[in-house]
Image (cartoon, grey):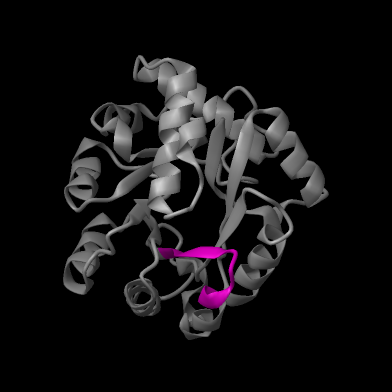
Amino acid sequence: MWFDNHCHLTGIDDDVEACVRQARRYNVDYLMTVGCTVEDSQQAAEIAAKFDGVWSTAGVHPHEAESGALGLAPLLEHPSVVAVGECGLDYHYNYAPKPAQVDAFKQQIELAHRHELPLVIHTREAWDDTFEILDAEGIPPKTVFHCFTGGVNEATKALDRGAYLSFSGIVTFPSAADLREAALVTPLDRIVVETDSPYLTPVPHRGKPNSPGYVSIVGEFLADLLAQEVTQFAAQTTANAMSLYCLDEDLDKY
């Protein structure tokens, strides 16, 4: 029983209901659909409200940082919304100016603190600034680095700050040796898994659209890497995600 703790159901071209049904055929019972703008976050909340076991976040992605994050606050009262983000810094593309990214990131950290919600972080080629901002603003008690792409050094810094690390299909790529080393030093109670679908399709389905059901492939790959029995690893990462997002599910079933 898997939990895809980061997907984008608003970006699915096909029927969302069919996508959720497909995920459950892969034993993916729980999904977190993540917002990237105010409008996208509203749509994510509305989608999540239609399905049991599906929740959403409200956030402004660093690519969209110039739009600001102040419009997110009302969405945080929606019953389907359980976290702030994804938010952070992306210096690879710099689609938004760095000062705008920093401001939007700080605004969303403040929202997470004010509403006592978990924080979902996107960081790419911006590790030093990301940690500096978190240290200055205070990292929320429940924080996850989504689609973690760092190595052992970045993993250690994130873990030392109490964060969870979320591994996507990138961990299956042949070129991702540093990422696999980071997974090996991550405590089992701090690992969660994701697809980031419809992006980052794992091996062996590269070149095809990604879907939440493929989180089982990511999880099985990590279980093998970490020498864990698959069923137990699925239970562990699902329990981790439930704890991360403070969800009121009966974990005895795991």
Whether residue 149 appears in magenta in the rendering, the answer is: no
In the displayed structure, would residue 140 be above or below residue 73? above
In the displayed structure, would residue 253 be above or below residue 143? above
Task: Judge left or right: residue 202 versus residue 124.
Answer: right
Q: Residue at x 60, y 35 (%)?
A: 201
Task: Judge left or right: residue 221 versus residue 215.
Answer: left
Does the rendering let one see residue 185? yes
Does the rendering let one see residue 208? no
Q: Which residues are magenta?
A: 76-87
Question: Where is residue 251 shown, x and y percent of the image?
Answer: 46, 38
Question: Where is residue 71 shown, x and y percent of the image?
Answer: 53, 84
The residue lying toward the viewer, choosing from 81 and 108, is: 81
**Image quadrant of residue 35?**
bottom right
Question: Where is residue 254 shown, x and y percent of the image?
Answer: 48, 30
In the displayed structure, would residue 163 be above or below residue 183? below
Question: Where is residue 34 shown, x and y percent of the image?
Answer: 56, 58
Q: Residue at x 18, y 48 (%)?
A: 157
**Image quadrant of residue 108?**
bottom left
Picture quarter with the N terminus: top right
Q: Residue at x 57, y 60 (%)?
A: 56
